[in-house]
Image: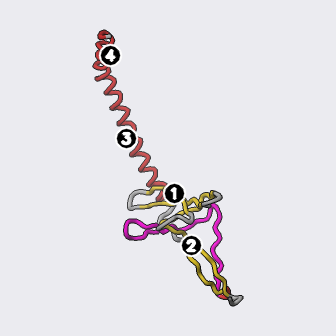
Amino acid sequence: MDEQKRIIEINGIKMEVDMRNVKVLEHYKVGDPVKVLKKEYQNYKSYPGMIIGFDDFKNLPTIIVAYLDVSYSEATLKFIYLNSQSEDVEICPTLKNDMPLTQGNIIEMFDRKIVVKEQELKDLESQKKYFLDQFGVYFGKMIEKECVKD
């Protein structure tokens, strides 16, 4: 074989590479901002993300990426685990101004979500109190009847 060509194998696929035209691959480190390309049903969608960890498993080294799924009114923080068995997902470096929203916009979305969940919690606490006030007597009587039967 020509000394300027080399055979490499990636994920079971063998390729012949011309070393004269080899491009240096991107090097990633924890904390690097990235774009996540993920298959959603039949289409692909891009998300802003950040590499947050690297698990150096012996058989399956894994890159951990946190990404933001931002819709019109909501932001959700999600995670992917990228390794040689990952399908329908990839990452690439992000450009400096690729984030369509500001940090303030995203924090505002999280704050709105928190307010909704706090109200749901208050509603559940009220329902529990009502149950205890109204049905507690009923269940108390049921317990007394069960004790009398024994």
Label 3 vs 2, first from the N-terminus: 2
Rendered image: mark on residue 79: 1
Comparing marks 3 and 4, which lies closer to the viewer? 4
Other residues around mark 1 within 10 Å, as few (<14) / some (14–19) / many (≥20): some
Q: Amino acid at mark 1?
A: Phe
Q: Are marks 3 and 2 in contact (CB under 8 Å)?
A: no
Q: Residue at x 39, y 70 (%)?
A: 43
Q: Amino acid at mark 2?
A: Gly
Label 2 vs 4, first from the N-terminus: 2
Image coordinates of residue 37 in percent, x first then y, are: 48, 69
Q: Amino acid at mark 3?
A: Glu
Q: On screen, 61 above or below 44?
A: above
Q: Residue at x 65, y 64 (%)?
A: 29
Q: On screen, 16 above or below 148?
A: below
* Coloring applied to the structure: secondary structure
Rendered image: mark on residue 40: none
What residue did someone put label 2 on? 12
